[in-house]
């Protein structure tokens, strides 16, 4: 039941936030905070139970599952409301709720128009994301996949910046078209399963062992891949991301970069490889190549940008390339690395978008050519930005390093050449990260009028983010432990990470 | 007592946290007490631990302190653990001891700077990272320290951020060393994949058990680690960042870019000497890199006009000697030179800092001159440091450099070549050092400003202590036998020893003939075009910056600029364009006019019938 309430709290909270605006303009954000606080309470409940239930025997697929819930929904087609939680989903849920708070907090002064509807969309997107991380029925999964998309579309198209309509439409089309391909694959998988067994089912655990002939498996996998590679995003499906990130309001960027991208990575880990292990194995060289391309191409484009938000957006492409590489290397090291990268990038990119948003709110520009010399004027923002740019370039002791190092260490066992190329990303990252610091904060001051530095609310947010980042860097074991049973389970389910030729 | 080891790196970390969390709100008087005090306490503690360690050495000859499990995945389990043996102890002494003296000096040197507190925060973070580097018990933690010192180097080179060129130098330092670091990271992946551990001691044991001498995997791993070492230690071909790094405040140059961080590569190779012993080709390359680097940077130093750049090239050259020593298996001699170099080069930088400060941040040596009478403390301490650098007998530098050169001479068939390079290097060192002293401290006074030596006590004391160390440092005992294999003793003969000892004197004489008595004139040599081209070539450090700019930097910039709009987006935009165009094309057909619709229906029907009839 906890799982059900976790999602429902946010759906109901969203509706209440919308209604609360009639009562008072500032009310929606308090309602949103309250809903998130309830969700956080539930998440902590799950987290504290995590150790106790590690060896929970009643779960369908063995010891890795911590909590489960199954209600019939459309029995005629074998569709059920089936949620289950393992260590990976638990970590991602914790990230989602954490960044949910940040998204509300950083929109505190930025969103002045229609704040009720804004918070409604924010909470519904989060609810959809939680559903995605928990759904163990493919139809339900697709349902949540759509639920998180549409409110996000509104967030960009209503509260976005100058080219918001274009960016929102692009985001919608990319996600929607690739999502439809996934739907086709889901339906085909269910039909094929019915042909061989005579029953309709969309249940993940039942479909896991489906026998498919190689040709079919390839096509079905590509359908899933389309959705997840677009969402991740991987080169060459990444072009929606810079536009969407740049145009979204700060809270939208935080959710988009921090959480939504992770649903793509989660989908690869949860569905693509376990459902189609052989097809995934055949696809591994291509996927790892795409990962390496994303790392290098993203880093190169990030360096070329003059818009601070676009720079951060392309750096996300680069970082998610590590995740793609790690997932398809498919061994415990690389998978744990992919999970750590998801968490760390979630925090670091969200924080950087918050910095960029704060600068835009104060200076009304994101063009680095018009910034510069801001260090003495706004030292707190500068130090926070410096911290997260350093995190993003993979400084040991901070979260991103742990993830990327583990990914590369695991991938090295699979392909020396790919890993060595991917490691060039370690050189490309400081090139874009340090130039961003230089062009924004170093140099001599331009603006003469005073600019407000981070206030108490913003410093409090950033203190949480910095603490999370340091924690991930110096004691990642606390998170690796939570994910470990799930990773081992997945690793056994589908042993694809054989050595490449 | 050894259990307090964790406090040694923690103290400077605490200093960093305190200084950064107070965000410059502390009164300026309090800052150095925290900044230098934390490092001083760490130095004191390191000394106490060192005495305890030497009085009652553990039976295993090392002490390990595991603090917590960092991560644990599938057999990969690096702990956060410290490892103390004679080698890491000496390094910790140098880092905290010299580090403390430089912090103390900085209290005076940086006084009044708006970023006073920020400066000490970065410096403390650096000392912390450097201590982690030398005390790490596994290569991942070492890599943390390794990257951490690189970060602090970046932050401190760009400390005066208003000037864009400082920012450029800082980024250059970070990115160029990152190139080496990446090679090193790949080396770690290789070691872990093959040996199943990154714990330094067990990895070395397994390597020795698993790999035979000269095996390709051992060689590859050693080459990759060497990549990291040449980046951090500014050796060929990644040495280009160090001269520009002089943009940082002078104490930074003394601490990071002379005494400690740049010698990390030497430490790394000494630490993994078993691996290099298994890879003779890689080890030979270490010696060759050292020999070529020391000659190149010695030649370059002859032409520099900025006092700090001369010292920077000299640092590159002296680290070249350490690499030479490592390459010929004179492990202890390398660490010995590392230590004496830390003393005398830190001294030289701090004395140069005293000159620079007294001349209101003038760094061009041709705007100095005749300073010996006006800046007596700076002059005498600089002179002592220079004597050690040049390796005049009885100074610390003499003992360590002499050891290296004699070891090189005895090292196999190519040994005499390596020795010869080292002797020529020693000659060059004497020339450029004497040139520097003659131009800066003697000759006519050229300074435009009123020159007065205004050194506070906090600046004078470190200068004097370091001057004493630069002289007597050669007498310090280095009990490295349990850690590093003893190099073979060679009988090199009296003549070789004599040439080795006299080369510096020849250099001094040459410098005096050019810059003292003006018997020969450089201007005359520069008048012919060949001489001038050579001069330009050397002045620009063998034009390696130019080469990298043309081959790497400019292409990357062009590539980035040409594709700012992301060519991958073009096909998607093409889809948009096509659908818009088709839309525009088809819109007129919906005109609302009945006869158009009737006509199109009739036409369509005709086509359908025609298809039906003819197929």
Image: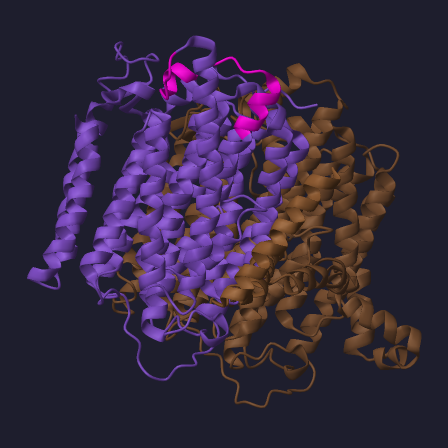
Chain colours: A purple, B brown
Q: Give coordinates of residue B74: x percent, y percent.
A: 47, 20
Seen at 60% across and 39% down, the residue is A290
Give the answer, above or below, for where B495 lies relative to B252. above
Report the span colored magenta: A199-221
Query: Compared to B187, does B130 lie above or below?
Result: below
Percent across and percent down for residue B550 are: 76, 63
**Would you place residue B361 above or below residue A197 in this image?**
below
Front residue of this view, candidates A312 and B324 = A312
Q: Is residue B278 visible?
A: no
Relative horizontal placement of residue A338, taking residue B190 as reference (left or right): left
Q: Is residue B562 visible?
A: yes
Q: Let me know if residue B586 is in the magenta part.
A: no
Looking at the image, residue B549 sits to the left or right of residue A432; the answer is right
Quadrant placement of the C terminus of chain B: top right
Residues A155 and A286: in front is A155
Which quadrant of the structure image shows residue B556?
bottom right
Residue A210 falls inside the magenta stretch:
yes
Q: Which residue lies at the image location 64% right of the left edge and 71% below the top edge?
A: B307
Give residue A98's quadrant in the image. Answer: top left
For residue B111, above or below residue A23: below
Q: How many marks?
A: 0
Residue B444 is left or right of residue B597, and the answer is right
Which quadrant of the rendered structure holds the N terminus of chain B?
top left
Residue drawn at (53%, 53%), measured in percent from left and top?
A: A239
* Percent x, y of residue B188: 59, 32
Residue nearer the viewer, B452 or B131: B131
Residue at 39% from the left image edge and 35% from the top image edge: B49
Q: Nearer the viewer, residue A276 or B472?
A: A276
């Amino acid at each position: 039941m906890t799982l059900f309430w976790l999602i429902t709290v946010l759906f109901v909270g969203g509706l209440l936030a919308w209604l609360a605006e009639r009562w008072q303009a500032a009310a929606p954000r308090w309602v949103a905070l309250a809903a998130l606080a309830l969700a956080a309470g539930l998440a902590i409940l799950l987290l504290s139970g995590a150790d106790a239930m590690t060896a929970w025997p009643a779960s369908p697929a063995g010891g890795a599952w911590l909590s489960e819930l199954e209600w019939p929904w459309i029995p005629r087609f074998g569709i059920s409301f089936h949620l289950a939680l393992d260590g990976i989903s638990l970590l991602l849920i914790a990230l989602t709720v954490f960044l949910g708070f940040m998204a509300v907090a950083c929109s505190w002064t930025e969103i002045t128009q229609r704040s009720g509807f804004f918070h409604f969309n924010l909470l519904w997107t989060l609810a959809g994301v939680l559903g995605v991380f928990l759904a163990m029925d493919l139809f339900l999964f697709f349902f949540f996949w759509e639920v998180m998309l549409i409110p996000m579309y509104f967030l960009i198209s209503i509260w976005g910046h100058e080219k918001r309509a274009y960016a929102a439409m692009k985001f919608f089309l990319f996600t929607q078209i690739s999502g439809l391909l996934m739907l086709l694959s889901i339906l085909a998988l269910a039909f094929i399963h019915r042909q061989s067994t005579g029953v309709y089912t969309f249940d993940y655990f039942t479909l896991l062992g489906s026998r498919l002939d190689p040709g079919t498996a390839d096509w079905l996998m590509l359908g899933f891949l389309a959705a997840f590679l677009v969402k991740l995003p991987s080169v060459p499906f990444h072009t929606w991301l810079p536009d969407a990130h740049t145009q979204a309001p700060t809270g939208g960027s935080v959710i988009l970069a921090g959480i939504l991208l992770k649903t793509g990575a989660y989908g690869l880990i949860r569905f693509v490889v376990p459902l189609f292990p052989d097809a995934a194995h055949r696809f591994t060289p291509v996927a790892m190549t795409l990962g390496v391309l994303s790392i290098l191409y993203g880093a190169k484009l990030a360096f070329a940008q003059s818009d601070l938000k676009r720079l951060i957006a392309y750096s996300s492409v680069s970082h998610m390339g590590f995740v793609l590489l790690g997932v398809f290397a498919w061994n415990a090291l690389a998978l744990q690395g992919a999970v750590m990268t998801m968490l760390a990038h979630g925090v670091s990119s969200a924080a950087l978008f918050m910095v960029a948003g704060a600068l835009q709110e104060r200076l009304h520009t994101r063009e680095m050519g018009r910034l510069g010399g801001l260090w003495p004027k706004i030292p707190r923002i500068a130090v926070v930005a410096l911290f997260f740019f350093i995190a993003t370039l993979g400084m040991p002791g901070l979260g991103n390093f742990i993830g990327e190092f583990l990914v590369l260490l695991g991938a090295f066992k699979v392909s020396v050449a790919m890993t060595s190329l991917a490691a060039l990303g370690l050189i490309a990252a400081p090139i874009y990260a340090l130039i961003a610091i230089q062009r924004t904060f170093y140099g001599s001051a331009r603006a003469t009028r005073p600019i407000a530095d981070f206030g108490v609310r913003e410093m409090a947010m950033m203190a949480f983010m910095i603490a999370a980042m340091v924690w991930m860097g110096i004691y990642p074991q606390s998170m690796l432990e939570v994910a470990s049973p799930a990773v081992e389970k997945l690793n056994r389910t589908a042993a694809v990470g054989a050595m490449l030729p | 007592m050894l259990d307090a080891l964790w406090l040694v790196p923690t103290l400077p970390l605490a200093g960093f946290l305190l200084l950064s969390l107070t965000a410059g709100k502390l009164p300026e008087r309090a800052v150095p007490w925290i900044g230098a005090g934390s490092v001083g306490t760490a130095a004191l503690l390191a000394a106490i631990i060192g005495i305890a360690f030497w009085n009652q050495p553990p039976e295993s000859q090392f002490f390990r302190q595991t603090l917590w499990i960092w991560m644990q995945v599938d057999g990969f389990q690096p702990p956060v653990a410290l490892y103390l043996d004679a080698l890491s102890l000496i390094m910790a002494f140098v880092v905290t001891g010299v580090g403390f003296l430089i912090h103390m000096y900085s209290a005076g040197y940086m006084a009044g700077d708006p970023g006073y507190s920020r400066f000490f925060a970065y410096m403390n973070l650096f000392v912390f990272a450097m201590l982690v580097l030398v005390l790490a018990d596994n290569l991942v933690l070492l890599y943390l320290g390794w990257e951490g010192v690189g970060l602090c180097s970046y932050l401190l080179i760009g400390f005066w951020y208003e000037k864009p060129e400082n920012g450029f130098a800082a980024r250059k330092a970070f990115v160029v060393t990152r190139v080496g670091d990446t090679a090193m990271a790949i080396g770690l992946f290789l070691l872990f994949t093959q040996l199943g551990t990154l714990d330094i001691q067990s990895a070395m044991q397994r390597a020795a058990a698993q790999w035979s001498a000269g095996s390709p995997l051992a060689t590859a791993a050693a080459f990759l680690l060497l990549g990291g070492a040449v980046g951090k230690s500014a050796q060929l071909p990644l040495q280009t960042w160090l001269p520009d790094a002089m943009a940082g405040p002078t104490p930074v140059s003394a601490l990071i870019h002379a005494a400690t961080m740049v010698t990390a590569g030497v430490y790394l190779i000494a630490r993994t000497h078993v691996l290099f012993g298994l890879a003779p080709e890689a080890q030979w390359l270490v010696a060759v890199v050292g020999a070529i680097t020391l000659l190149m940077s010695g030649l370059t130093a002859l032409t520099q006009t900025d006092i700090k750049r001369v010292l920077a090239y000299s640092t590159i050259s002296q680290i070249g000697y350490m690499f030479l020593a490592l390459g010929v298996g004179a492990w202890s001699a390398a660490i010995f030179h590392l230590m004496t170099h830390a003393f005398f080069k830190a001294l030289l930088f701090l004395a140069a800092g005293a000159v620079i400060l007294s001349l209101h941040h003038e760094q061009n040596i041709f705007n100095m001159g005749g300073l010996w009478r006006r800046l007596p403390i700076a002059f005498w301490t600089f002179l002592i440091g220079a004597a050690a650098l040049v390796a005049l007998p009885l100074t610390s530098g003499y003992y360590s450099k002499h050891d290296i050169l004699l070891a090189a001479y005895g090292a196999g068939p190519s040994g005499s070549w390596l020795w010869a390079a080292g002797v020529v290097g020693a000659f060059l060192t004497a020339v450029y050092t004497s040139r520097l002293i003659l131009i800066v401290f003697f000759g006519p006074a050229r300074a435009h400003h009123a020159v007065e030596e205004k050194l506070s006590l906090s600046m004078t004391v470190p200068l004097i202590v370091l001057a004493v160390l630069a002289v007597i440092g050669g007498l310090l005992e280095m009990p490295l036998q349990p850690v590093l294999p003893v190099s073979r003793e060679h009988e090199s003969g009296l003549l070789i020893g004599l040439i080795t000892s006299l080369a510096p004197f020849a250099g001094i004489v040459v410098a005096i003939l050019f810059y003292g008595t003006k018997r020969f004139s450089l201007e005359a040599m520069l008048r012919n075009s060949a001489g001038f081209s050579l001069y330009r070539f050397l002045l620009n450090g063998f034009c390696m910056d130019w080469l990298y700019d043309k081959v790497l930097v400019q292409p990357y910039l062009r590539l980035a600029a040409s594709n700012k709009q992301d060519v991958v987006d073009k096909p998607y935009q093409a889809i948009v364009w096509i659908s818009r165009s088709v839309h525009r094309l088809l819109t007129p057909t919906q005109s609302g006019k009945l006869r158009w619709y009737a006509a199109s229906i009739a036409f369509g029907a005709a086509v359908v019938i025609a298809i039906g009839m003819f197929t």
